[in-house]
Image (cartoon, rainbow, N blue to C red):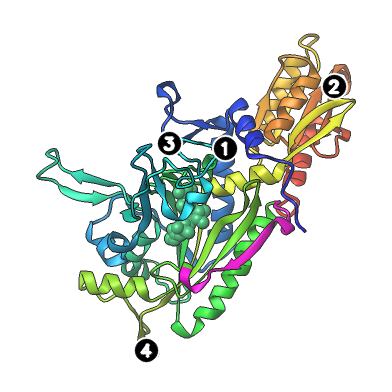
Amino acid sequence: MPQPSVATMDKIVSLCKRRGFIFPASEIYGGIANTYDYGHYGVLLKNNVVAEWWRAMIQERDDIVALDSAIIQHPRTWEASGHLAGFTDPLVDCRTCKQRFRADHLDQVPCGQKPSKHPGEDAVCDLTEAREFNLMFETTIGPVKEAGATVYLRPETAQGIFLDFKQVLQFARRKPPFGIAQVGKSFRNEITPGNFIFRTLEFEQMEMEYFVPPDQAQHWYEHWLHERFEWYVRLGIERERLRLRAHDPDELSHYSSGTSDVEYLFPIGWSELEGIANRGNFDLTQHAKHSGERLEFNDPQSGERYVPHVIEPAAGVGRSVLAFLCDAYDEDEIGGEQRTVLRLHPALAPVKVAVLPLLRKDGQPELAREVYERLRRSMKAEYDEGGAIGRRYRRQDEIGTPFAVTIDHQSLDDRTVTVRDRDTLQQERVAIDELPARLLERLDPAGA
Ligand code: GAP
């Protein structure tokens, strides 16, 4: 039976706040529902997750191209995609406490009057019938609200890819199978409490639409299930805390003929990390119909013409960050003292190396800064001379820094330093001149 990591959601939320990774947005005004800001280490971690995704999509393959499409698209996009009619959640209102709940999540949220119960469980609860509520945020183009055009903040990045399919086919000179990848913000008017950054109103998605000949759809669906599952494992997530779960027919989105989720055993239980969908030719056909453009592939060699089918791996950046944080979180004891450590994969760690003079005198800070300035040319390094060395190690352990380099009195004599490993706690003496190459090799053994 797989066990979740030792992390609880409370511990992750508290570490993220304490170390400035992620914290509630608009806090001076009391916060805003399901909305968070990323601080310094959170930004670095998030950027590393996104960079690893791009690496897997673009650098390590030659059949995928990148795109960055607009957040606000022509409003007919959402008519064609089915989002205007079908991207809804069933909501109920309580006439007593005036709160609104998702009808299918009543068992997950507290009652507005009696928080120990769920909505509808107490005699005072007075719930309305469920009504469908569209999750897209609406806004207006133009200075006058009444005369402006109603537009929508995109609820998924995928549609921008379909709108640009024809352009990319031409300028990137591709033929199926090929993919278009993009990372960007999406917006959904979620009303269910989000479990920290698991479900937020605005979130970044990493989506790739892979266009294939119709008879190859099943093959590529299975290919992407495997690729995406292994991506998380390669970046350090325990294999036993990941699983693939195929959607039941009644769970499928309106566009999908088959979807499986990569699920992670979060502290809240098994939950979706990423969806891999077989979208068939739904989107290209719909946009062709609504725009009047031909969105198909015309093979000049065989004369064959067809609307490609689409396999879509769609991941959330914030949800991945949360899974990496939960899985890396650990607690142990060093010399009778409790330690919190993030055992993040080095590729994801916000800071790769900390440079710490043992003492703030005798030329140690000067040599330490020289080492730091050399290292930061090739990796994210941090210099810290404040406080006892033990406390400085603990601080780096908590933000997941894989290596700490300490400059001591011997360093001034023989230009060597000690390198402390975050996980094994072993210390090794290394010559300053060899340090950048040695660290780079340990950070990326395959790439060195
Ligand atoms: N284009 C397909 C699509 O958007 P989805 O399953 O709705 O599919 C894909 O979203 C991924 O985006 C999810 O697996 C999740 O990681 C992330 N995601 C979706 N809604 C989210 C939300 N409200 N907050 C944070 N992440 C979200």
Name the spot of residue 431 as percent of width and height, x first. Answer: 84, 32
Q: Helix, strand or loop at disc 2?
A: helix
- Quarter that holds the N terminus: bottom right
Q: Residues within 10 Å of mark 1 (few under 14, many from 20)?
A: some
Ligand 1 lies under 8 Å from the Cβ of mark 2: no
Horizontal arrangement in the rendering, residue 12 relative to residue 3 (left or right): left
Which badge, 3 or 2, comes first in the chain's sequence?
A: 3
- Residue at which label 2 appears: 411
- Residue at which label 3 appears: 33
Ligand 1 lies under 8 Å from the Cβ of mark 1: no
Q: Distance between the Cα atoms at labels 3 and 1? A: 24 Å
318 above or below 258? above
Which residue is at a point 63% across and 68% down the rendered structure image? 226
191 above or below 260? above
Q: Distance between the Cα atoms at labels 1 and 2? A: 30 Å
**What range of the chain is rendered magenta?**
236-250
Q: Helix, strand or loop at disc 4?
A: loop
Which badge, 4 or 2, comes first in the chain's sequence?
A: 4
